[in-house]
Image: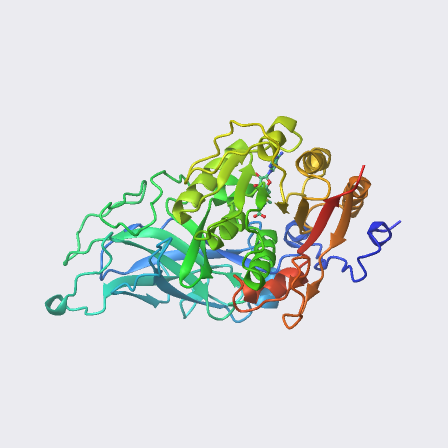
Amino acid sequence: MSLMDLLPKDMPNFRPYKVAPISPVDSLNNSLTKNTALHRLILQQPIQSHLQLEKWYRVNVDVVTEMGILLTPHKLEEEFQQGIRLTCSIYHHNANYQNDEAQLIVEVEPLMKDIWDADTAPVAPWPGFAPKSCHGGFKYRLSTAARSPQSFVPVALPCGHCYLMIQSTSHADSILPIVIGPVHFDQSFPPLLNHTWEKTFQTDSTCSKCAPIDHREDPVNHINIHRKITVKDGCHLLIKERWNCGTPGKLWDSAILMTSLFANAIYKHPDRFVNHRILDLSAGTGYTGIYIAKLYQNHPHPPTVILTDTKEALPLLYENQAINQVNVGINQLMWGKKKHARRVTSSTTKITKFKAFNLTKKTSCPLDIVIASDVLYNAKDMVSLIQTFLDICTYGKTVIYFGYKNRGLKEEELIQFFQQCRVHFHVKLIQPVAPTSQSDNLDSLLLPSQSIPYHSHIPLLIQSGACIYTMTKKEK
Ligand SMILES: C[S@@+](CC[C@H](N)C(=O)[O-])C[C@H]1O[C@@H](n2cnc3c(N)ncnc32)[C@H](O)[C@@H]1O
């Protein structure tokens, strides 16, 4: 029996997952990098975070897969034969307002080879990556528009910090940009001579519009890595990642696809989720739930958005809630734990601004939507995951949006999972449809329209096997 035989009959165009050819040389690496199409820029080394204006600094970045693995020589040959070109711009994150126009510019230049660089490490003649290399970088300096001491213009940002947004100009659709920071700069001229490597971040409370800055130490990155997402009208999300924290610490392809589904639905019907109760199960960075909450931020009847994950993953959710100043509930929910499941379906308590739920009342409060993005990757968790689906879903009401991308799971394990799900749930694969389609149904995945975050990346995600299913509980 094949996977096709087991899938519900209403999945006519089910696409088998595309698997990259595996060469014997690096089969292990390939098995981990298969189905990878949208790559990430990440910091190779911490950057100095207290900067002097007018001084050149260096940033080293790697291009890696969704899982953080360096690209294989085969991929590099295939996709990056001409190298990768990067640009850098300044971003001043302000969770609620238009990006401030900083009177600050950033200039970039190619790296020069340092004596400590390995002889074999190629250096690109442009800011970015040399041909077929997954290590790259550039030199950059911040300056005011008027550079000479005589015509020095004080920097306009009152808080003295900003972020650096690095993106590829040559591979804009296949490499996710990165936002690093905050970097602090001295606004006086000439700049201070002593500077330190970043350990903790300090914020200047005089800037009332700025989002709070993380004061905690990030032992590996030293400086924070984020993704920037435009929500609407100049309002952006800054989603922090913690690559040293494993699976919850990064924005997965599935979450990008899932968010585009919800963004499309809300774009077409702004009141679609009014007064709904939405759970982002095992939310990781919290991107999808935070995005929905942000879109409804000023709505008189916003949905109640709850983000859950393991205990270890909760601090990142709190950080992303604070950086983006959204009202969401945050709670621990371990798959299979009935007590945890009850907490999200039996509370009527309101969300306190930027605080976790105060779970006191035990009145039944069924969920309308469950977002389960990229939660199936380990066969040993299948039973407890399905148990949680059963515990949090109400017949006739709850719809699970199940985001999936095949990486390590064996085909027979996937078959088994869907077999078990189909005992209790109706399962449907959401079909991608063209943006011109008249469908205004959430259950159709509209291919990118300009207003959708990361719209230019969506075709690649679908091509690499990311997909979304709906599951609704069967009547007993
Ligand atoms: C691949 S990440 C996906 C994160 C996010 N939903 C996304 O799509 O970006 C898997 C998530 O499942 C969570 N997780 C793993 N095991 C879990 C368990 N036993 N109970 C609850 N959550 C778990 C991880 O902490 C992580 O956030």
User: Going by the picture, which residue comes out furthest to the front?
Assistant: 300
Looking at the image, the residue that sits furthest to the right is: 1
Residue 86 versus residue 250 in the image, above or below: below
Q: Name the image quarter holding residue 439.
A: bottom right
Taking 132 as reference, is 40 above or below it? above
Between 300 and 431, which is closer to the camera in this rendering?
300
Image side of residue 198 versus residue 341, left or right: left
- Across and down, in percent, residue 465 comes to 69, 57
Ligand 1 shown in quarter: top right
Q: Report the front residue among 13 and 399.
A: 399
Q: Position of residue 225 (x, y in %)?
A: 43, 50
The residue that appears at 58% across and 42% down in the rendered structure is 279
On the image, the x and y values in percent for residue 10 come to: 81, 57
Q: Could you tell whether 282 is left or right of 350 in the image?
A: right
The residue sitting at the left extreme is 150
Q: Identify the residue at horizontal 55%, vertical 38% (top origin).
A: 308
Quadrant in the rendering for residue 138: bottom left
**Res. 109 in view:** yes
Q: Is residue 74 visible?
A: no
Q: Nearer the viewer, residue 299 or 68?
A: 299
Give the residue displayed 24% in from the left and 57% down from the top.
157
